[in-house]
Amino acid sequence: MKSRDDSEDRYEEILKRIAQRKPFGGKSRGAEAQTPQDQALDLVNAYDALAAQTREEFQHVLCYGPRALRGSAWSGALIWYHRKGYYGYQTLHLLGVWAHYREGECLLSMGIRSLPYRAPVYDAGVYRVAIQSNFRIYYDDAGGPPDKDDRLLYQVEFNETDRLKQRRALLDKLQRWRGEIQAG
């Protein structure tokens, strides 16, 4: 016969396991940033700042995301957008904030990358649904940090003590981008 203490211990163990489970279709609760790059993006609130942009209605572009992506030495929070109209799919623009390493220093970079359409066939209905959650299918790109061919909007060495200044600078750059997009 089981004692009351054994039953209570078993009950507590079951409750603990339930609390640690992932929600359906999502990440586990309380997941901590796993890399220094993720932590840098969290400290400047990059993901939420970009998410606010996708909730706006723009006259000339359709905007999707945000999405958090990772590479071997970088992490990024990005949104993607293209011009409205039937041929707008031909070029997709990634607007992102990346934390990445160069010469041993962690940099915060904000930029715009332009990607050409890469799929062999274009079906407007399928594209419209798929592009809302993933740009990689049609544009064959990992979403990494901007390079010399891309438009760099902001770059600074990440410093935790200056994170509020860096967050403000990123928000200012997003405000300018929004103005450019609304102007057409």
Image: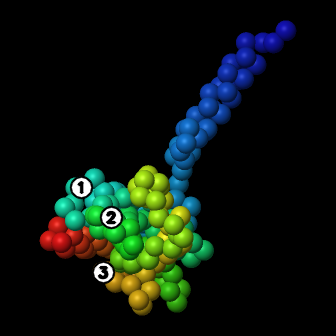
Residue contact between numbered discs 1 and 3, judged by CB atoms under 8 Å: no
Residue 14 image position (x, y, % from top left): 67, 27
Say left or right for 155 vs 69. Answer: left
Q: Which residue is pictured at 62% across the width and 27% down the height? A: 15
**Residue 19 lies in quadrant:** top right
List the residue tagged with mark 1: 56
List the residue tagged with mark 3: 153
Q: Is residue 134 above or below residue 95?
A: above
**Residue 110 lies in quadrant:** bottom left
Q: Which residue is pictured at 60% across the width and 74% down the height? A: 72
List the residue tagged with mark 2: 86
The residues bearing labels 1 and 3 have C-alpha atoms spaced at a distance of 21 Å
Say left or right for 83 vs 19. Answer: left
Q: Pick the residue in front: 46 or 24.
A: 24
Q: Residue furthest right?
A: 1
Quadrant, the N terminus:
top right
Say left or right for 169 vs 4. Answer: left
The residues bearing labels 1 and 2 have C-alpha atoms spaced at a distance of 21 Å
Q: Which residue is pictured at 38% across the width and 74% down the height? A: 91
Q: Which residue is pictured at 53% across the width and 64% down the height? A: 137
Tell me the element at label 2. helix
Callout 1, which amino acid?
Answer: Glu
